Amino acid sequence: MHDNIEKIIVSQDEIQEIVARLGQQLREDYQGKNPIFICILKGAVMFMTDLVRAYDDFSEIEFMDVSSYGDELESSGEVKIIKDLDVPVKDRNIVIVEDIIDTGRTLDALIKLLTTRGAASVKICTLLSKPAHRILDVHVDYVGVEVPDEFLVGYGLDYRNQYRNLPYVGVLKPEVYA
Ligand code: 5GP
Ligand code: MG
Ligand code: MG
């Protein structure tokens, strides 16, 4: 285990099981639909690359980078697009791939955006869900695992752009923030 990690919340084995389960479920649900998996940068990169290999059927992968407008108090669900898609989504079946859903603001805004652009369907697949912080009641179709209300790093999730490469999801030691 990395020196700065206090405890592991989702182990490497658990991640593998989650990815296999969600990949199979998606494959059954999207048979013949050639979905576009949209990875939300950068946190969902690890999950995305494992998930599409577990999915193992006709599909496309695309990337978007978004950030929430303003601070937590002000955010109205508007997201700022830092990197947009370079393909049309009209009449396509979309699966948004996220690392974690917290307040739900990012995903709520993304679903609205892609729906406005004419997507045939927009569903969400998230590795982690933090129900304690949910502000918007976003329907999440595919959830890996629910996690406690703690700041998590690893398997894509960062603290100041570090720790994304850990193969598990964990909590940092308090002194790391000091
Ligand atoms: P939401 O719009 O659901 O509040 O925001 C979700 C985003 O907040 C995630 O994609 C992620 O970037 C960030 N986030 C939320 N909780 C955590 C966490 O525990 N650790 C890290 N590293 N990022 C988080
Ligand atoms: Mg994210
Ligand atoms: Mg981050």
Image (cartoon, grey):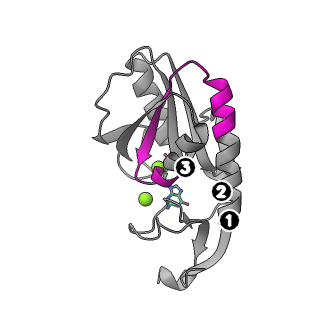
Q: Which mark is residue 11?
A: 1
Question: Residue at the spot x=44%, y=14% of the render?
Answer: 91
The N terminus, quarter of image? bottom right
Distance, label 3 to label 2, CA atoms, is: 10 Å
Which range is magenta? Answer: 23-46
Q: What residue does disc 3 label? A: 50
The picture places residue 25, in percent across and down from the top left corner, at 69, 34
* Magenta stretch holds residue 128: no
Query: Would you identify the image quadrant in which residue 90 lies?
Result: top left
Q: Residues within 10 Å of mark 1 (few under 14, many from 20)?
A: some
Question: Is the residue under label 1 in contact with that under label 2 (CB below 8 Å)?
Answer: yes
Distance, label 2 to label 1, CA atoms, is: 6 Å
Q: Residues within 10 Å of mark 2 (few under 14, many from 20)?
A: many
Horizontal side of residue 79 vs 10, given as left or right: left
Give the mark nearest the N terminus, 3 or 2: 2
- Circle 2: element type: helix
Q: Is residue 96 visible?
A: yes
Question: Residue at the spot x=32%, y=33% of the render?
Answer: 85
Question: Is the residue under label 2 in contact with that under label 3 (CB below 8 Å)?
Answer: yes
- Circle 3: element type: helix
Q: What residue does disc 2 label? A: 15
Q: Is mark 1 within 8 Å of ligand 1?
A: no
Q: Looking at the picture, which amino acid does disc 3 mark?
A: Asp
